[in-house]
Every structure is written in C-alpha cells, then in structure tokens.
Image (cartoon, rainbow, N blue to C red):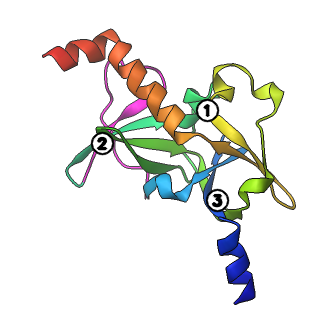
C-alpha cells in the first residue's frame, strides 16, 4: 500500500513504449486510443512519403503515418510484428506505424531529461525528452508535435488543399 501511495504522490506517467527502427520510444499512454495489428491500407496518391495510406477502422478513416519515415529514418519493414498506434488528432484519427510494441513503463517525471543536443533539427522537435531506466533509454515522443506538424503539412500540401476544396 505504501508503494502505491508513493507512485500516486509522484504523479507517475505511464509510457507506452515501442520501437521505431532500433530506437526505443515512448509516449504518454493517455494519448493512445488503441494499438492494432497492421491492416490492409489504401494508398493515397501524391501523399507525403511518410503517409503509408488510409484504412477504415470500424467506420473511422485513419491516416497511417510511418513514424520512422516521419523522423527521417528508413521505412518501417512490414515483416516482423509492426503495429499501428492509433491516436486522436484534432478532427481526425492518425495511426503511427511502428516496428514493434514494447512494455508500459512507469516514469517519474522528475527523472525525464531534456533530449540530447544530437537530436537537433526537425527530428529533435518531435521529442519531449529522454527517460533512463536501469538498462535502456526511452526517447519520449511529443505526439502532439508529430500530429500538429502532420495537420499543417496536410493543409499546406497542394493535393490535400485541392481535396479540401472539392
């Protein structure tokens, strides 16, 4: 009981962790709507290279983004055990395609360190910081920044602007 009270007192954050390429990343589990196996997607012509396609998830259209490509890494291989992390974005649903799901990690916000300087440039803007566990580092993804920039890109992209007008 004492341990539970200590966790509550420290405002522990639960991080859903996953692999993007070989990097272990995480995001606040409260931002995650659900996690699904890779489903059949419809390719969107003239979409940015990181948009894998769209899918119908129980009547909701979900745009699937290859998170590795979005972060400037190699494309996520569809072999193995890739998953879609479905998150709610303003006005739409977005799926983040990741290489593999890992564990839920209880993180003390006081132990989250700023993202290292070598995460500079646009990729670094996607991270809130780094959390150290006993044997690994978790890059904490700023889901809102990824989704914000996605919606800005979609409005600025001529194909999306034309689709929005029609």
Left or right side of 36 for 165? left
Nearest the viewer among 42 and 14 is 14
Instruction: State which quadrant residue 42 falls in.
Output: top left
Nearest the viewer among 108 and 118 is 108
Q: Secondary structure at mark 3?
A: strand
Nearest the viewer among 60 and 131 is 131
User: Residue shown at 68%/63% (left/top)?
Assistant: 105
Q: Residues within 10 Å of mark 3 (few under 14, many from 20)?
A: few
Examine the structure image and report whether residue 45 is included in the region drawn in magenta. Answer: yes
* Residue 70 appears in the picture as rendered: yes
User: Mark 3 — residue?
Assistant: 102
Disc 3, disc 2: CB below 8 Å? no
Which mark is first along the chain, 3 or 1? Answer: 3
Which mark is first along the chain, 1 or 2? Answer: 2
Residue 58 locus on image (x, y percent)? 23, 55
| Picture disc at residue 16 | none
Residue 55 locus on image (x, y percent)? 30, 42
Which mark is first along the chain, 2 or 3? Answer: 2
User: Residue shown at 24%/47% (left/top)?
Assistant: 60
Nearest the viewer among 50 and 163 is 163
Residue segment shown in magenta = 36-57
Examine the structure image and report whether residue 130 is included in the region drawn in magenta. Answer: no
In the displayed orientation, state which residue is furthest to the top.
Answer: 158
User: Residue shown at 66%/36% (left/top)?
Assistant: 127
Q: How many marks?
A: 3
User: Mark 1 — residue?
Assistant: 126
User: Mark 2 — residue?
Assistant: 55
Q: Secondary structure at mark 1?
A: loop
């Amino acid at each position: 009981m004492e341990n539970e009270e200590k966790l509550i007192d420290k405002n522990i954050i639960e991080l859903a962790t996953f692999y993007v390429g070989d990097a272990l990343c995480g995001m606040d589990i409260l931002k995650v709507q659900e996690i699904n196996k890779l489903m059949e997607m419809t390719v969107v012509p003239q979409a940015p290279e990181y948009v894998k396609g769209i899918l119908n998830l129980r009547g909701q259209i979900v745009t699937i983004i290859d998170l590795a490509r979005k972060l400037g890494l190699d494309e996520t291989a569809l072999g193995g055990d890739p998953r879609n992390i479905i998150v709610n974005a303003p006005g739409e649903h977005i799926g983040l395609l990741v290489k593999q799901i890992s564990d839920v990690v209880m993180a003390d916000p006081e132990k989250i360190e700023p993202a290292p300087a070598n995460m500079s440039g646009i990729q670094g803007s996607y991270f809130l910081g780094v959390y150290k566990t006993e044997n690994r580092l978790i890059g904490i993804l700023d889901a809102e920044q990824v989704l914000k920039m996605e919606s800005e890109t979609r409005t600025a992209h001529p194909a999306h602007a034309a689709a929005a007008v029609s």
